[in-house]
Amino acid sequence: MEGEILQNVSGEVELKNVKLAYPSRPKNIIFEAFSLKVPAEKTVALVGGSSSGKSMVVVMLERFYDPLGGEIVLDGVIIHKL
């Protein structure tokens, strides 16, 4: 299986209306319609309580888990197409 290859990566990341639950607890929704846009070359801090889903944002970017709904976009390309 081959995906699209980005020739030039600027690093803009956008989560659009993401829905996510922990795979071990599918009925416990972590994110519902969560959106976040991080422009290229910018730094963002995710702050929240224990088990609030902060680490899951990175886990989704790394594609260990895919969202139940919505899209994660890197430089204008949905990441599951990469």
Image (cartoon, rainbow, N blue to C red):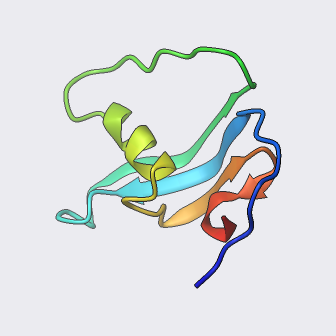
Total numbered labels? 0
Tell me if 29 is positioned left or right of 31 in this view: left
Figure quadrant of the N terminus? bottom right
Q: Is residue 3 left or right of residue 26?
A: right
Residue at x 33%, y 20% (from the top left corner): 48
Quick one: 66 or 16, which is closer to the camera? 66
Instruction: Please say if 77 is above or below 54.
Output: below
Q: Is residue 50 left or right of residue 64?
A: left
The percent position of residue 19, horizontal first and vertical second, equals 50, 56
Residue found at the very far bottom of the displayed protein: 1
Residue drawn at 48 percent across, 15 percent down: 45
Frontmost residue, 6 versus 46:
6
Which of the 4 image quarters holds residue 8? top right
- Quarter of the image for the C terminus: give it: bottom right
38 versus 17 height, above or below? above
The spot of residue 72 in percent (x, y) is 63, 52
Quadrant of residue 52 within the rendered picture: top left
How far from the left and from the top, in percent, is residue 70?
Answer: 62, 59
Tell me which residue sits at (76%, 40%) in the image. 9
Q: In the figure, is residue 28 to the left or right of 17?
A: left
